[in-house]
Image: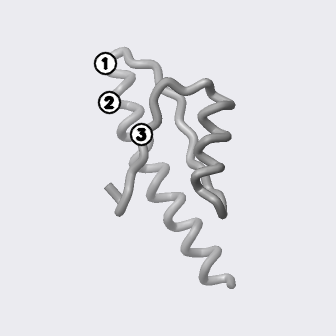
């Protein structure tokens, strides 16, 4: 269990680094950005809840660490 928690934290940290790079590039181009890293047992529900909460026009999802 503790290894699973540690892995989640490692992946969250990597995701934050990538999001910050993308956010910086967007801001340099004067693009408004709101970011949120969603962790959910049912990821599709987490994404939909976040999209509704932020009234999102666009959702960009990474996969495989890219």
Label 3, label 1: how many angstroms apart (C-alpha)? 17 Å
Mark 3 packing: few (<14 Cα in 10 Å), some, or many (20+)? Answer: few
Mark 2 packing: few (<14 Cα in 10 Å), some, or many (20+)? Answer: few
Give the mark, 3 or 1, whose residue is nearer the N terminus.
1
Residue corresponding to mark 1: 29
1 and 2 marks in contact (CB < 8 Å): yes
Q: Residue at x 58, y 52 (%)?
A: 44
In this view, the residue in front, 52 or 31, is: 52
Mark 1 packing: few (<14 Cα in 10 Å), some, or many (20+)? Answer: few
Label 1, label 2: how many angstroms apart (C-alpha)? 7 Å
Q: Residue at x 49, y 49 (%)?
A: 16
- Dividing the picture into quarters, in which one does residue 12 lie? bottom right
Q: Secondary structure at mark 3?
A: loop
Q: Secondary structure at mark 1?
A: loop
2 and 3 marks in contact (CB < 8 Å): no
Q: Position of residue 36 (x, y in %)?
A: 57, 41
**Tag shown at residue 60:** 3
- Location of the N terminus (image quadrant): bottom right
In the rendered view, tell whether residue 49 sits above or below residue 14: above
Q: Residue at x 32, y 55 (%)?
A: 66
Q: Nearer the viewer, mark 2 or mark 3?
A: 3
In this view, the residue in front, 6 or 56, is: 56
| Number of marks in the rendered image | 3
In the rendered view, tell whether residue 7 sits above or below residue 66: below
């Amino acid at each position: 269990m503790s290894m699973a928690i540690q892995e989640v934290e490692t992946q969250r940290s990597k995701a934050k680094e990538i999001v910050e790079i993308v956010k910086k590039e967007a801001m340099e181009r004067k693009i408004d950005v709101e970011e949120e890293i969603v962790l959910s047992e049912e990821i599709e529900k987490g994404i939909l809840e976040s999209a509704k909460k932020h009234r999102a026009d666009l959702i960009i999802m990474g996969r495989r660490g890219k």
